[in-house]
Image (cartoon, helix red, strand yellow):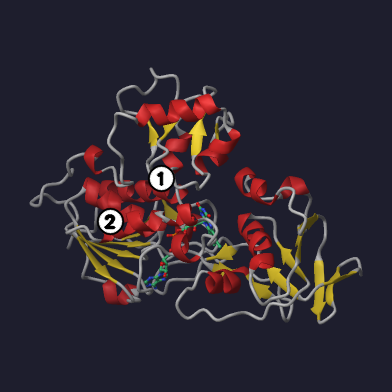
């Protein structure tokens, strides 16, 4: 299912900034922007991630099956005469700003080949002539786009193919399965972009709880992930974000667990829920999923969950899906509360030559496409503040 933009479009282009596939046009600067009736989604490239719908201020972007047929047709016909884009926008790339003999960065290391690292790499390719060495401790690119996005969203996972094409660029030196430290990188590169993510689950602290990360890593087949012990008939998922809803949708479908129903618990009221409208639409009306709000978990044992009010809710599995946090990077400052590396526009505070992008820069929030604008800002900063010059 792809998305379509209706005639209510306000052309503020916030959807363009977050679209991971660059498949919304005309974008600012392109012919037609501001003079066409609005913006259009290219159905041949859309990966159904919902980022445009979640950010649209006027609710003009909708899944095709919830759009008026005329809007679906208008979106498709805008692209009929145009060649398909591959998510890289190679044709629209500006010439590099630096020639090889200028004082721009020559060698840049990007640590982490998740969405933020890949968008930073793409931006560096586009805006500089730097050679980029791309590291990831995993053997493949994609980060959470590969090992976080739910398996029933195969279209969204297709973004990984775009990332693979970026990694194959002749100016990118891809180092899979390589974990690197700040000390190892020091002196070898003009600049380092840290894009190591923030994929460590926050915990309730109740003995026996499972975390979202453990289950998500297993059902996505992340190397090294083990099958968690899941028991039914009821599972409780604590958390009110999109990952909690992914789990609520998928737990009853996993074979051999005996889970037939899921209770999603929010510690605050529904007004504080962090899930997006597009994620909610996928669980809306499902009989096997129930929601309760204003419940504080206090204890967990083989009978179930005890709430702070003393109520026992029987369940065989307790999963905390209350958010993610980053891990400190040795040699860089770290903000324990936010779980990020403190930075200004992506430049690490107090460490010239070091930059951050993605969840480790701004905390574990936002979908894949949000990392595009985030990485663009970081690379802009890198190219503007420059790199430390030898004394
Ligand atoms: C469970 C889950 C489901 C999600 N589903 C969706 C969805 O359906 N749609 C959507 O738009 N967004 C989704 N998101 C959000 C999206 O995945 C994030 O916005 C995005 O992945 C963050 O990108 P990142 O590059 O900052 O981090 P990551 O994706 O975590 O990438 C970080 C990379 O750095 C590597 N790394 C870490 N440390 C090192 C090191 N020391 N050396 C080398 N490599 C290192 C990691 O292996 C990883 O590949 C989901 C997130 C989660 C957690």
Residue identified by numbered label 1 = 373
Is 153 left or right of 314, judged from the image as shown?
left
State the quadrant of the C terminus.
bottom left
Q: Position of residue 58 (x, y in %)?
A: 58, 28
Residue at x-position 75% and y-position 67%: 260
Q: Which quadrant of the structure image shows residue 290?
A: bottom right
For residue 304, above or below residue 11: below
Task: Pinpoint residue 195: horizontal percent, then vertical percent.
Answer: 39, 62
The quadrant holding residue 307 is: bottom right
Can residue 238 be seen in the rendering of this structure?
yes
Q: Secondary structure at mark 1?
A: helix
Q: Nearer the viewer, residue 77 or 360?
A: 77
Q: Which residue is mark 2?
A: 166
Q: Is residue 236 toward the left or the right of residue 184 in the image? A: right
Task: Please tell me which residue lies in front, 363 or 291.
Answer: 291
- Distance between the alpha carbons at the discs numbered 1 and 2: 17 Å
Helix, strand or loop at label 2? It is helix
Q: Is mark 2 within 8 Å of ligand 1?
A: no
């Amino acid at each position: 299912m792809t998305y379509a933009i209706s005639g209510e479009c306000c052309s503020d282009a916030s959807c363009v900034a977050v679209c991971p596939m660059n498949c919304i046009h005309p974008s600012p600067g392109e012919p037609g922007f501001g003079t066409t009736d609005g913006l259009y989604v290219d159905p041949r490239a859309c990966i159904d991630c919902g980022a445009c719908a979640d950010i649209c201020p006027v609710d003009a972007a909708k899944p095709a099956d919830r759009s008026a047929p005329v809007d679906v047709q208008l979106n498709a016909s805008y692209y009929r005469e145009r060649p398909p884009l591959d998510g890289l926008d190679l044709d629209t790339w500006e010439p590099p700003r630096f020639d090889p003999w200028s004082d721009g960065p020559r060698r840049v290391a990007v640590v982490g080949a998740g969405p933020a690292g890949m968008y930073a790499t793409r931006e560096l390719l586009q805006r500089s002539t730097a050679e980029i060495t791309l590291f990831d401790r995993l053997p493949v690119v994609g980060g959470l786009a590969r090992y976080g996005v739910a398996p029933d969203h195969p279209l969204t996972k297709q973004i990984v193919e775009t990332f693979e094409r970026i990694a194959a660029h002749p100016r990118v030196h891809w180092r899979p399965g390589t974990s690197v430290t700040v000390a190892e990188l020091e002196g070898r590169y003009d600049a380092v972009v840290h894009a190591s993510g923030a994929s460590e689950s926050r915990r309730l602290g109740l003995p026996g709880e499972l975390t979202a990360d453990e289950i998500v890593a297993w059902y996505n087949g992340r190397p090294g992930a083990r099958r968690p012990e899941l028991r039914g008939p009821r599972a409780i998922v604590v958390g009110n974000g999109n990952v909690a809803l992914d789990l609520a949708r998928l737990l009853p479908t996993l074979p051999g667990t005996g889970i037939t129903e899921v209770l999603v618990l929010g510690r605050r009221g529904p007004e504080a829920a962090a899930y997006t409208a597009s994620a909610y639409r996928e669980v809306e009306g499902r009989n096997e999923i129930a929601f309760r709000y204003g419940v504080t978990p206090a204890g967990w044992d083989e009978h179930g969950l005890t709430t702070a009010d003393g109520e026992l809710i029987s369940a065989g599995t307790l999963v905390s899906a209350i958010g993610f946090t980053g891990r400190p990077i040795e040699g860089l400052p770290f903000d324990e509360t936010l779980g990020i590396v403190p930075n200004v526009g992506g430049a690490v505070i107090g460490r010239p030559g070091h930059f951050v992008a993605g969840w480790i820069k701004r905390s574990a929030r936002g979908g894949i496409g949000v990392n595009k604008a985030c990485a663009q800002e970081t690379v802009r900063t890198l190219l503007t503040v420059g790199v430390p010059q030898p004394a």
